[in-house]
Image (cartoon, helix red, strand yellow):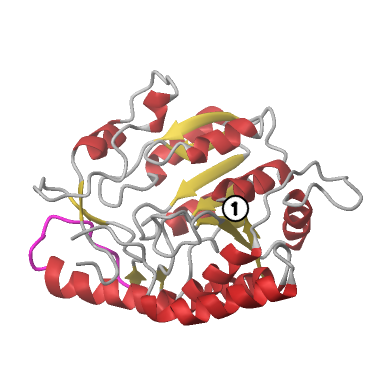
Amino acid sequence: MKFTIGFDKEDLNKLHKYWDEIIEKGQWSEGKFTGQFEEKWSAYNKVKYALSFSSWAGGALAALEFFSVGGKTVLCPSNTFMATPLSAVKAGANVEFVDCNREDLCMSFEDLKIKVEKYKPAVVFVVHIGGHIAFQIKEIAEFCRQKGIVLLEDCAHAHGASWSGKRPGTWGEAGFYSFYATKTITTGEGGMMVTDNTQLADYAKAYRNYGKFDYKVQGLNYRINEFAAAIGCVQADRLDEIINWKVEYAKKNLDPKFKNRVVFPEGMRSGYYKYIIFDPIEKSTGRVYDMPCHKIMGKSYDLPNTDWVAKNHWCVPLYYKGE
């Protein structure tokens, strides 16, 4: 199956109409489609606020700086993309890593409890890997509440996922989506923060726009442009169809063939950014990640499940209407 961006050609006329409207109006940033994209994402994910950014990192940095992590410790899973720990480093935090589970490739609650006792973090950054929700997110969220730790969610893979109707990014204080070109839906580049925290939302709005207009927030330019936001509107409208297609394709064509795979808990629906198995195959799209972040950043401690996962999982091609 050849890689394809999840854009349906049936939407081309609608998109060109949107772009023509943007050009005719002459407002190429901070306009109608940025607002519409945010409204659609907020409604879909059942959150009070959805705030667009030029990248996943813009939203993550806004939240990390809002929670004043400078000089404090942030815990991340090592089985993630380097964007997660690097955002915390850029916000001035010390980053330490938590092992993952072999079953879901996501943060281990058991190791988290050990690391919280050892490092006394201000923030825990959980990552939803491969399109599904971290299997222990409920336990992690409750634990963080009890300990007074801010929980943030990296939802870069998790478009369209749910667990008994609850969306990624709604267990913690905020979640962050990526719309990079390889994602389930894409705007080429872009990101979105979801949150119910009004103070965080107000801070993030200023942060993405240089801190205008009183400059009390020391932000920079993390705005999405109107052309990308228009693509986001089209893609958001198509998201359920994309996920439904992937779920049905996986159920019919992949599940019977690959028994040794990530198996989801009852009530969980994956967005299937990746179809993850634990046996090598010839036509794999590779691994989600094959180099743990703790090793990239020179940490000397051992994370056995993370090291095992890096060597023992593969991804079966699964692209919307792929050939």
Q: Which residue is mark 1?
A: 145
Considering every residue shown, the one lying at the far right of the view is 214
Magenta stretch holds residue 49: no
Q: Is residue 303 above or below residue 199?
A: above
Residue found at x 25% / y 51%: 103
Residue found at x 30% / y 62%: 4
> Which quarter shows the C terminus?
bottom left
Residue 84 % position (x, y): 50, 41
Residue 59 % position (x, y): 62, 51
Q: Amino acid at mark 1?
A: Arg
Q: Quadrant of residue 313?
A: top left
- Is residue 26 in view? yes
Left or right of 220, for residue 294: left
| Span highlighted in magenta in the image | 256-267
Dot 1, how many residues are within 10 Å of its Cα: few (below 14), some (14-19), or many (20+)?
few
Q: Main secondary structure of the magenta part?
A: loop
Q: Quadrant of residue 241?
A: bottom left
Left or right of 251, for residue 38: right
- Is residue 146 in view? no
Q: Is residue 74 above or below residue 57?
A: above
Residue found at x 17% / y 49%: 284
Residue 186 % position (x, y): 46, 62
| Closer-to-camera residue (243/173) | 243
> Which quarter shows the N terminus?
bottom left
Identify the element where label 1 is drawn: helix
| Closer-to-camera residue (303/203) | 203
Q: Is residue 219 above or below residue 91?
A: below
Q: Quadrant of residue 36?
A: bottom right
Residue 101 % position (x, y): 31, 45
| Closer-to-camera residue (228/183) | 228
